[in-house]
Amino acid sequence: MSDLRTDGDRILLGFTHALRGAGVNVTSDRSQTYLQAVSLVGLDDRRSTFTAGRATLCAGPDDLARYDQVFEAYFGSRDGLPMPRPAPVSVPSYGDLPLSDAAGAAEETDDVTRAMASDVEVLRHRDVARLSAGEKQRLTALLATLAPRAPLRRTARNRAWHRGRVDAQRTLRTSLRRMGEPAEIAWRRRATRPRRVVLLVDVSGSMSGYADTLLRLAHRISHALPGTVETFTVGTRLTHLTRALQLRDGERALVAAGDTVPDWSGGTRLGETLKVFLERWGRRGMARGAVVVVFSDGWERGDVSLLAEQSRQLGRVAHRLIWVNPHRGKDGYEPLQAGVQAVLPYVDDFVAGHSLATYATLMEVIADA
């Protein structure tokens, strides 16, 4: 019975994350209240579960339409909780087609293919905060097409190469094995190894429309570059999410991350959280020589001078500091926020981060760091 209750809670928490991804401001307090309400009305009563969610998770009239849409898409059926649906068995029917229609059928297929490619291209440039629940599901699938590459750093060791500097020792050893006969010249170059990447994701209220997608992006980067990526969330406090994102299944990883983060959709105290990061993690080696990527719109409710000082120190410790702002690539945007102006002097790259296309560009910026 306890396992069933745990599975039910996991499903309900997954639903709250789906709501958050659709733009509904679901805080951790509302999620806990929702779980308590469903435990009282009974998980098997779908209507009561629907009503309990509307009463506890929606903050205003604007959330109701999104709630209805996400509830129907997530639970998938009017009869109960989400469950795998067997694919309908279809019996193919064969008929004679006139030969003259072959060219027309091929042309129609090409038109459908072009339309699908056009839809994908449009979705790549859409603002993720404005996507519907169905479009977010398609975007999640497209995130898997990103190909992150690790930034490299040179090591003290050398490796054999087809050009570079002459490797005198290896050349001499080869000559000695040939009893002093001239040997082919050996070459060498400095070896390389992946540089650590640290991701700091802002999950405050002003970033609620992007936080879910950014954590999915962090999950993609973590599994594409295993062993070299560390992920944290920042808001009113610092939370280490690397272990939660190690789960291979993206949905389970997001549920685990949601259970770990206590300040989802809360306030923004970037200066204080960056200070905690530097004191506990940064100066001890995690950020030293690493590529640090901060995902935030720069809305700071704390001391802006503290944010500037911590950004300066972080820029000195890190190999490269990249700031990703979801509003950077939008028409008419100007960095007028006090938080953004405080960090810009210490940022190596200030890039956009509101669409799949900008995330692909970010992958290149990280790889070239």
Image (tube, helix red, strand yellow):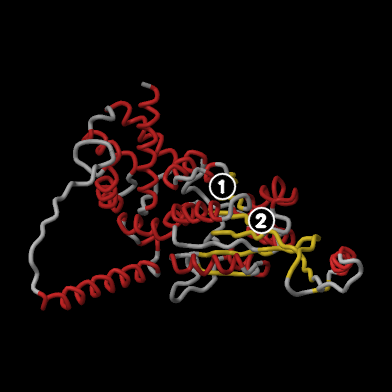
Q: Position of residue 86 (x, y in %)?
A: 24, 42
Q: Amino acid at mark 1?
A: Thr
Q: Amino acid at mark 2?
A: Arg
Q: Mark 1: few, some, or many residues within 10 Å (few <14, many ≥20)? A: many
Q: CA distance from mark 2 to mark 1?
A: 25 Å
Residue 293 vs 122, above or below: the answer is: above
Q: Residue 355 lies in what quarter of the image?
A: bottom left
Q: Position of residue 175 (x, y in %)?
A: 87, 68
Instruction: Name the quarter where the N terminus is drawn.
Output: top left
Q: Residue at x 68, y 59 (%)?
A: 195
Residue 173 is tagged as: none
Residue 196 is tagged as: 2
Residue occupying the far top of the picture: 1
Depth check: 174 or 351 in front?
Answer: 174
Residue occupying the far right of the picture: 180
Secondary structure state at the residue bearing disc 2:
loop
Q: Nearer the viewer, mark 2 or mark 1?
A: 2
Q: Position of residue 53 (x, y in %)?
A: 30, 39
Residue 236 is tagged as: 1
Residue 32 is left or right of residue 313, and the answer is left
